[in-house]
Image (cartoon, rainbow, N blue to C red):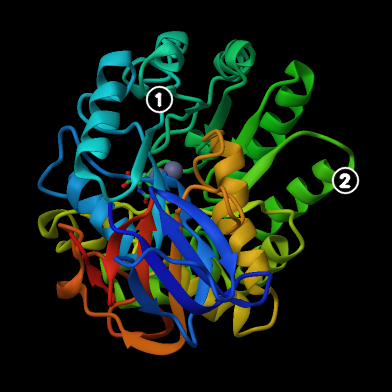
Amino acid sequence: MTAYLITGAKIVGGDVADLLIENGKIVAVGTNLDAPKDAETIDAQGLIALPGLVDLHTHLREPGREDAETVLTGTRAAALGGFTAVFAMANTDPVADTAGVVEQVWRLGRDAGYADVYPIGAVTVGRKGTQLAELGAMADSAARVRVFSDDGDCVWDAALMRRALEYVKAFDGVIAQHAQEPRLTQGAQMNEGALSGVLGLTGWPSVAEEAIIARDILLNAHVGSKLHICHLSTKGSVEIVRAAKKRGFEVTAEVTPHHLLLTEDLAASYNPVYKVNPPLRTKDDVEAVREGLADGTIDIVATDHAPHPVEDKDCEWSAAAFGMLGLETALSVVQQAMIDTKLMTWADVADRMSYRPAAIGQVGGEHGRPLEAGAPANLVLVDLAAERTVVPGESASLSRNTPFDGMTLPGKVVATFLRGTATVLDGKLAR
Ligand SMILES: NC(=O)N[C@@H](CC(=O)O)C(=O)O
Ligand SMILES: [Zn+2]
Ligand SMILES: [Zn+2]
């Protein structure tokens, strides 16, 4: 295994220092390090070193929709975005609702070698919302599933949600809820408000999200289990989670990069690249989720990377699929929305995009650790002063549905290391 001496990096939360990587681990951080003769030196002057990013919400589409993404292409996109671990959502075909499917996804990730893939198990059989899936068998499988979600659909049946929360207590699992009251969002196409009226698109009211979040926080408090809220998007949701945490209720929540930066106005173009679940909201909502992320009400940023092939996006708005790409642009979007606005520091970014998602996902010390001697060498070097213009055709993803097409964003991932192996060098795939 190549040893690396990374020189002159600004260690997030610390000083400028050198990092020595050997046998998959960070063996020393400091100056005048005693590197082996054959170590490869990487000049990281002017770069910041962050812990490898962890995405708790990625759609890798394999098995079943390998035309949209595969574990290989999705994890390449992850590595280019600075991620060393991704949690793969269960809405594949077949659905990841058995030990067999989650083990298959886990193995594909390991064989690809670009990022650790932690499969998320479905809560209900076929994600149909009627019968609990074999949660225990998925937890006991080689994939060691700890996060369960019917993402794409809400576990709307309160009795079933209660049973799921109760069940996962046995192995300290967490239920990640896609908070969408289905009866309030039938045929919904975009955020409900004045603009949806003008555009003639069926509205998706904030309360459809907020009602489920409030219900599930109470349900979870009753049961004493672990609840995580996927892609929270409204001001009201932030207020509910903030009030709940203040009163000591156990809940964690995520926000996506796109909900931190983009607003519903983009729907006026009728370009389905801006169609997403939950929908892009208003400026007020964007401000509220930014504040919520900054003050810790929202625990983490998760990409909800949702690749779709051209034929599912290049059509009329109402016929198009919901979802947008996110892995390769996430860190830059967070830099623009949270750092350039002085709402957060880089230490906060390490917390919201590495330490906390790793803790929620229970990766057992493999990821989400400070850059110190003894930690696995999962890290990313970023040039904060660089800028890049997003070109969909340059993506490592098989899909092209990025809403940031043509935007110039700050920051560029220069190198990513997964357990001491470079997955990205000089901003390009290294293997
Ligand atoms: N976010 C989306 O708009 N789409 C996701 C499903 C989901 O995250 O709910 C997808 O699988 O395409
Ligand atoms: Zn969802
Ligand atoms: Zn999703």
Q: Which secondary structure, mark 1? A: loop
Crowding at label 1, few (<14), some or many (≥20) Cα neighbours within 10 Å?
many
Crowding at label 2, few (<14), some or many (≥20) Cα neighbours within 10 Å?
few
Residue for point 28% across, 75% down:
427
Residue for point 57% across, 70% down:
282
Locate residue 6, reporting x and y percent.
44, 72
Locate residue 381, reporting x and y percent.
44, 72
Locate residue 262, reporting x and y percent.
48, 73
* Corner quadrant of residue 238: bottom right
Residue for point 52% across, 59% down:
192
Marks 2 and 1: CB-CB under 8 Å? no
Locate residue 275, reporting x and y percent.
34, 61
Q: Which mark is residue 362?
A: none
Residue 394 visible in the shown view: yes
User: What is the three-letter code of the residue carrying label 2?
Assistant: Lys
User: What is the three-letter code of the residue carrying label 1?
Assistant: Gly
Q: In front here: 20 or 168?
A: 20
Instruction: Tell me which numbered mark, 2 or 1, is placed earlier along the sequence.
Output: 1
Left or right side of 400 for 84: right
Image: 151 above or below 404: above
Q: In front here: 72 or 120?
A: 72
- Which residue sits furthest right? 247
Q: Which mark is residue 121?
A: 1
Q: Quadrant of ligand 2?
A: top left
Q: CA distance from mark 2 to mark 1?
A: 30 Å
Give the labeled residue for mark 2: 246
Residue for point 24% across, 64% down:
401
Quarter placement of the C terminus:
bottom left
Q: In front here: 323 or 75?
A: 75
Residue 324 visible in the shown view: no
Image: 37 above or below 233: below
